[in-house]
Amino acid sequence: MLGKTHIAVGIPAAYLIMQPKTLTEFAVATIGGSIGGVMADIDVHINTENRFAAKASLDALYGEMLAVAISFSFIIADYFADGNLIDGIVKHVILSMIGAIMLAALIVVGKMSEHRDRTHSLLAWALFTASVVMIEPHLGLAFAIGYGSHLFIDLFNKSPIRLLYPLKKGICFKLCYADRLGNELLLIVGVVIIIFYTTNSLFSLSEIVANLFK
């Protein structure tokens, strides 16, 4: 599936499972769901050999940029609203640093992988999640949900993923293409869930905005 769809699925998946009520909880679920939602595609390499390859590879890059932008927005909002996301990370700074180093190393390894290979596996899911858990446990849970949602919906594609890496055989259900109707439906459903959840949560968006100006 495309990058924006993985974000649109990762975030509501984190919302529905974690049930955030405070700004910090929303920040954690949104950051983890969005970053986790696109992390598996860190193995996509920019390819401009033809317009189809360029579209697919650039989409992954744009998805990663969007996830980073969303994450920074929520970090800043949480900070100015006196949230405790950053405090939770700094509280165990040594462990957080170890997790950050491990995450950086995994990203480097992922960058050197073929698409739908190592990073699209349960092993990668476990290792990436462990690194983020060390940075901040609740963020790690949201990340695990986002990453897991990526692997799950990619199984519906016609191209296999090496879910059981290091086993060589790939797995897929061959139900849809990554950039066609199935992708659009998941995107729409994900966005609808995000809108529905945020507007009906006990901690409304109006309260979030109000906290920014206290």
Image (cartoon, rainbow, N blue to C red):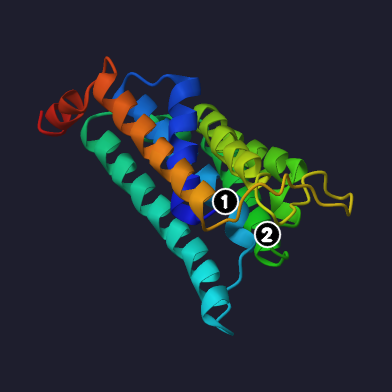
Residue 125 appears in view: yes
Residue appearing at x 43%, y 44% in the figure: 187
> Label 2 amino acid?
Gly
| Number of residues whose C-alpha sits closer than 10 Å to that of mark 2, classed few (under 14), some (14–19) or many (20 or more) | many
The residue carrying mark 1 is: 39
Q: Nearer the viewer, residue 93 or 44?
A: 44
Front residue of 123 and 168: 168
Horizontal arrangement in the rendering, residue 22 relative to residue 81 (left or right):
right
198 to the left or right of 124: left
Q: Is residue 100 left or right of residue 19?
A: right
Residue 157 image offset from top left, x and y in percent:
65, 51
Which quarter of the picture shows residue 99?
top right
Residue located 63% across and 38% down the image: 129
Label 2: which residue?
110
Residue that lies at the very extreme toward the bottom in this rendered image: 49
Circles 1 and 2 in contact, beta carbons < 8 Å: yes
Above or below — where is 81 with respect to 127?
Answer: above
Q: Secondary structure at mark 1?
A: helix
- Residue pictured at 42% horizontal, 51% vertical: 67
Which comes before the other along the chain, label 1 or label 2? Answer: 1
Q: Is residue 18 above or below residue 97?
A: above
Report x, y in % for residue 203. 26, 19
**Amino acid of disc 1:** Met
Q: Residue at x 70, y 67 (%)?
A: 112
Q: How many marks?
A: 2
Q: Pick out the residue farthest to the top.
A: 202
Residue 132 location in percent, x, y?
58, 39
Q: CA distance from mark 1 to mark 2?
A: 9 Å
Q: Is residue 214 above or below residue 113?
A: above
| Residue 63, position as x, y percentages in the image | 45, 57
